[in-house]
Image: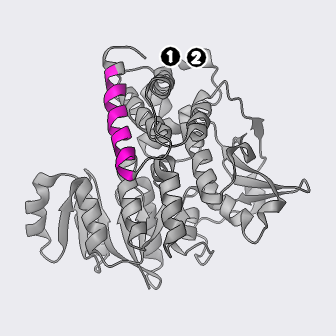
Amino acid sequence: MKRILLLGASGSIGQQTLDIIRRNPQDFELVGFSVGSHTEQVAEIILQNPHVQSFCIGNPEAVKQFKKLFPNQKVYSGDQGLLDLIETTSCDLVVNALVGFVGFAPTVRALEKNIDVALANKESLVVGGDLIRNILFHNEVHLYPIDSEHVALAKCLKNHDVQEVRRLVLTASGGSFRNLSREKLSEVTVEDALRHPSWSMGKKITIDSATMMNKGFEIIEAHYLFGFPQEKIDVLLHDESKIHSLVEFTDGSFLADIGPADMRIPIAYALYGGSRHCEAINRLNLSDFGDFHFHTFDPKRFPCVGYAREALTKGGTALAILNAANEVAVQAFLQGDISFLKIESAIAKCLAEIPYLEHPTFSQIVEADRYTRVYCQQLIKENNV
């Protein structure tokens, strides 16, 4: 029985993780979880998972109330509460389904405590890939990716010598605006951006898909997860989102991971420690897949991928600057403060103007994140993006 601590239980990945736990009670039990503002879900999660020891909510002012409602569980709140949850909850695996930089410290804390992590929080590897790789090298602990693209790569690379690999190919839907020219992007609305053609995801990741920053992040993640230089990591547009990624080998052949657009498949693969023990939840016959369509990735059409590659080349806190600027700019767009294309210009400006450190400590990464947020918010406030 694997004891699961789930961070971000109320989000899309969190809800699908809970579904897998419900479907496989012989293999998993939920012992702790966190929710942000969706505290209305706490009671149902505890009712369906009687082994829960503790949970964390976003609002510290509600802690007293929740302690009265749930006297048998420890209750924490805020960012520090996430770390307290990891410190005090007896678990075998932390599933980090948090969105944004807030997920970085919990990933580091869990790995430092020799607790395996199943990681959906892209930002952890984006801002702290070198730091996390160092922890993995020195500790007897595992990091399992949850992103469908990286799970696909892990499956295709399994039992193959890295010398046989020519390149990794990350597939991309192209997001909500894949059929629009750059000229038309200046007119798009928030509602337009949130209509993803293939996946049902949270707002932030859906906007990242529309700008393709999510694919830039995935290049960075693939670099740190599998150890390949970014020159060997490419992007290919694929309309149907059925081929989740490919590996090209030196003999010219490819291995691809093909399956439904269902995140429960890669989540289950991570929960089972990189194996296919889970029974199919959404099975399709090959004839149901239909035709596959591919398009060459155009870096000029999606400049955010180039910004991600630039930050990875620089390394250090340039990656924290990239992520923080993106988070601030995406939130500003969602709030109607800037237009869609201003997301890109805000990121470019922060990368160009904010100095970076090459070999940062954990605290220096946190400070780079804080400084960039203030800087980017000021740029937006002054209409200077």
Q: Residue at x 28, y 60 (%)?
A: 82
| Residue 10: x %, y % from top left | 34, 57
Q: Which mark is residue 184?
A: 2
**How far apart, in angstroms, are the residues tagged by discs 1 and 2?**
6 Å
- Asked if 194 appears above or below 287 in the picture, the reply is above
Give the magenta-colored segment's residue range. 362-378
Q: In the rendered image of this protein, does residue 159 appear above or below residue 214?
A: below
> From the viewer's perspective, is 197 left or right of 299?
left
Work out which quarter of the rendered image holds the C terminus and state it. top left
Provide residue 341's location: percent of width, then percent of height: 50, 21
Displayed quadrant of residue 280: bottom right
Residue in view at x 30 percent, y 18 percent: 381
Q: Is residue 15 visible?
A: yes
Q: Which residue corresponds to the image point at 39% horizontal and 14% vertical from the top-left?
A: 384
Q: Residue type at mark 1?
A: Glu
Does residue 196 appear in the picture of this structure? no
Query: Is residue 214 inside the magenta stretch?
Result: no
242 or 362: nearer the viewer: 362
